[in-house]
């Protein structure tokens, strides 16, 4: 199940689109007229495109009755988000690269591979809703030399609509994020390494260069252990995000620069905690204006590896620390 998938409630008639994943195995579903409701994941089922087509009755099969008997169908929910890049395993030596449109938008796009200052065209055209296009094939042994993928995507649909801003995304595969991105690829319906391109604040990971990376990647793709976890240093159980604890020289830093450093430390520590199989980690962010705490909680709520988070040791930290429980 992915963002943008059409779903139905198990114990009800409501249908909608998966909008977000919340803590506690809760899914936020957008139903008619833009209303969103929180639902437990096991209380909804995915509606396949084939099923949707079969459920549509032909006009001549509808029951003839009075005007009062007619039921006016609801305006279907429109899936706004769900653009992915997927790396599907061909064998233990190669992967195929696919651009996936799991939204209801029609997407004119261009896709290129950038190697230093040289651009190589991978594909261009119009990606229809709930469809995918193969862009390239890459060798696993060349993982560290894979190019930076560059996408320029527009949005279109028939009728009246509010036009989103064009999507311009560059993506460079890094070892630690690649290993953790394995899952079911929307539309393709198979396991792959999947990146969401239209997710807000797409994470930027540091480059990891280790001998034998291609062997570890091959092991991961063939279903073996996630060797990428061994590449990341385990953080402490408690991470203090006060700026003076992160770096000694803070002269000349404004509030924006300080927040950026704190968030980068948070992301790095959380990622290393997940990669090393830690069950929980606590972040000390202080009370202050609440900006850092709010942003941390927003990001934690969108992280699929977080089981839940809560205020930590109120008697000691008040509302100045957050405990994160990792799946």
Image (cartoon, grey):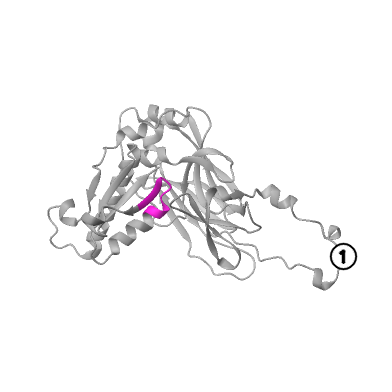
Answer few, some or many: residues within 10 Å of disc 1's Cα (few below 14, many 20 plus, some between 14 and 19). few
Whether residue 269 sits left or right of residue 56 in the image: it is left
Q: Secondary structure at mark 1?
A: loop
Whether residue 217 sits left or right of residue 4 in the image: it is left
Quadrant in the rendering for residue 233: top left
Residue at image position (23%, 46%) is 238
Whether residue 94 sits left or right of residue 327 in the image: it is right
Residue at image position (42%, 57%) is 200
Asked whether 304 falls inside the magenta stretch, the response is yes
Q: In this view of the protein, which residue sits in the foreground, 164 or 7?
A: 7
Q: Residue furthest front?
A: 315
Asked whether 203 falls inside the magenta stretch, the response is no
The magenta segment is 300-309
Which quadrant is home to the C terminus?
top left
Across and down, in percent, residue 307 comes to 41, 47
Whether residue 327 sits left or right of residue 2 in the image: it is left
Across and down, in percent, residue 68 comes to 80, 72
Find disc 1 in the rendering and name its residue. 64
* Image height of 255 relative to 123, above or below: below
């Amino acid at each position: 199940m992915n963002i943008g998938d059409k779903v139905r409630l198990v114990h009800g008639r409501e249908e909608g689109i998966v909008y977000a994943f919340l803590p506690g195995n809760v899914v936020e579903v957008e139903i008619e007229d833009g209303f969103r409701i929180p639902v437990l994941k096991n209380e909804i089922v995915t509606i396949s495109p084939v099923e949707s087509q079969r459920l549509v009755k032909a006009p001549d099969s509808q029951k003839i009755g009075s005007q009062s008997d007619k039921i006016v169908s609801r305006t279907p929910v429109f899936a706004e988000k769900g653009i992915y890049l997927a790396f599907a395993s061909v064998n233990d030596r190669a992967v195929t690269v696919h651009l996936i449109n799991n939204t209801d938008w029609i997407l004119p796009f261009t896709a290129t591979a950038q190697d230093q200052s040289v651009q190589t065209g991978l594909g261009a055209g119009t990606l229809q809703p709930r469809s995918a296009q193969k862009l390239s094939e890459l060798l696993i042994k060349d993982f560290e030399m894979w190019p930076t993928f560059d996408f320029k995507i527009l949005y279109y649909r028939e009728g009246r609509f509010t036009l989103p801003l064009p999507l311009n995304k560059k993506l460079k595969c890094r070892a630690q994020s690649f290993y953790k991105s394995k899952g079911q690829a929307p539309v393709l319906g198979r396991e792959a390494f999947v990146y969401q391109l239209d997710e807000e604040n797409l994470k930027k990971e540091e480059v990891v260069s280790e001998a034998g990376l291609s062997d570890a990647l091959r092991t991961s793709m063939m279903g073996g252990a996630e060797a990428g976890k061994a590449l990341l240093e385990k953080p402490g159980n408690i991470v203090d995000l006060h700026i003076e604890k992160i770096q000694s020289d803070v002269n000349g830093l404004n509030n924006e620069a300080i927040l950026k450093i704190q968030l980068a430390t948070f992301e790095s520590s959380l990622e290393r905690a997940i990669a090393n199989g830690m069950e929980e980690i606590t972040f000390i962010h202080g009370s202050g204006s609440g900006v850092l705490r709010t942003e941390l909680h927003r990001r934690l709520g969108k992280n699929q590896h977080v089981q839940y988070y809560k205020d930590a040791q109120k008697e000691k930290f008040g509302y100045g620390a957050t405990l994160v429980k990792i799946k």
